[in-house]
Amino acid sequence: MSRFWSDVVKGLNPYVPGEQPRLANLVKLNTNENPYGPSPRALEAIREATTESLKLYPDPNAGQLKLAIGKYHGIDARNVFVGNGSDEVLAHIFLGLLKQARPILFPDITYSFYPVYCGLYQVAFETIPLTDDYSIRLSDYAKPNGGIIFPNPNAPTGCLVPLAEIESLLQANPDSVVVIDEAYVDFGGESAIPLIARYPNLLVVQTLSKSRSLAGLRVGFAAGHADLIEALGRVKNSFNSYPLDRLAIAGAVAAYEDRDYFEKTCRAVIASREKLVKELKALGFEVLPSAANFIFVRHPQHDAQESALALRRRGIIVRHFKLPRIEQFMRITVGTDEQCAALVAALQEIAGKR
Ligand SMILES: *Cc1c(COP(=O)(O)O)cnc(C)c1O
């Protein structure tokens, strides 16, 4: 704390990102990155864009990327907003659409950036508890609100809400914005993007960080009615006109064009997840049903924090949250089959030693 800090900064409670260790040879299963790496075509496009042209500012509206995303999802580019990672897109949503007279609603156990943005932008919120089986029950959100936001599948649980229930929520809340954060939807969910044509209060957010393996490029987007998109554009143009650089635009466009690579790698992650779930259940773990590229697990006999530390000593890092209701869980990113095998072997050894 310094006397130079503003009152806003003094009151902040910043997000704590998962660790990015410098050590090589770690089995890194803590931040839900994709083990397969970006499409080779995306990498090639980034190399090709690395020229003299970097002296010029990029297209402030990233029009080419909006077209590529629109084409992929069968929507108009006017219904797409892009940003420097979906975290930035979410930040603009909190300021531009969710800062309302009534409190917004989100689950008690969810992406921990949401309360952080509420703190930054002074957005009032109320959390709605997950059910005893850690799922989101949308009938619990039937109350006056300034907006609703949740990830689908949810993080860090991996649990999915069926699209039909989301549609009922949209119908029940015609006067507030409903934001579905689909960071993990490509690993087993069905996107709500087709619903934006019928629901002007729906905003769907996606990222290229997980299923397209471009966490290092920082690209995310929102899809919704043109009026919602315009609000985000107004915030963006009051904050940073060029959130996406030339390399990011080039790489992201190419990633959308390489549908085969995307589908193949998503299928591989899903197959590894199903195998890993079986193996961990055989070791006595309870595994929440996951539609994501991570699983949320607990063991009736082994303390989660101790297990995470024991894994770490064996060069495997997973995520543990010291938070009410979930402190006995570990969140484990689905890696390659080899990485998953190393995890299972280490957990077997850890269990055997006690
Ligand atoms: C990873 C993640 C994001 C952020 O993704 P970026 O595009 O890398 O900023 C947003 N929401 C959820 C739920 C996530 O897990």
Image (cartoon, helix red, strand yellow):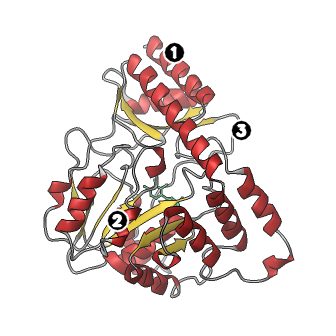
The percent position of residue 72, horizontal first and vertical second, equals 55, 62
Which of 32 and 81 lies nearest the eye of the viewer?
81
Q: What element carries label 3?
A: loop
The amino acid pointed to by label 1 is Glu
Which residue is labeled 2 in the image? Answer: 195
Q: Of discs 3 and 2, which sits in the foreground?
A: 2
Q: Of discs 1 and 2, which sits in the foreground?
A: 2
The percent position of residue 187, horizontal first and vertical second, equals 47, 44
The amino acid pointed to by label 2 is Leu
Which of 108 and 4 lies nearest the eye of the viewer?
108
Which residue is labeled 3 in the image? Answer: 24
Left or right: 299 as drawn, with respect to 264: left
The amino acid pointed to by label 3 is Ala
Circle 1 crowding by C-alpha within 10 Å: few under 14, some 14–19, many from 20:
few
Quarter the C terminus occupies: top left
Q: Earlier in the sequence, mark 3 or mark 2?
A: 3
Whether residue 163 can be seen here: yes
Q: Is the CB of the residue bearing disc 3 within 8 angstroms of ligand 1?
A: no
Q: Which residue is drawn at 36% across and 43% down?
A: 157
Q: Which residue is drawn at 50% across and 70% down?
A: 88
Q: Residue 349 carries which label?
A: 1
Left or right: 282 as drawn, with respect to 78: left
Q: Is mark 1 on a helix, strand or loop?
A: helix
**Residue 165, quarter of the rendered image:** bottom left
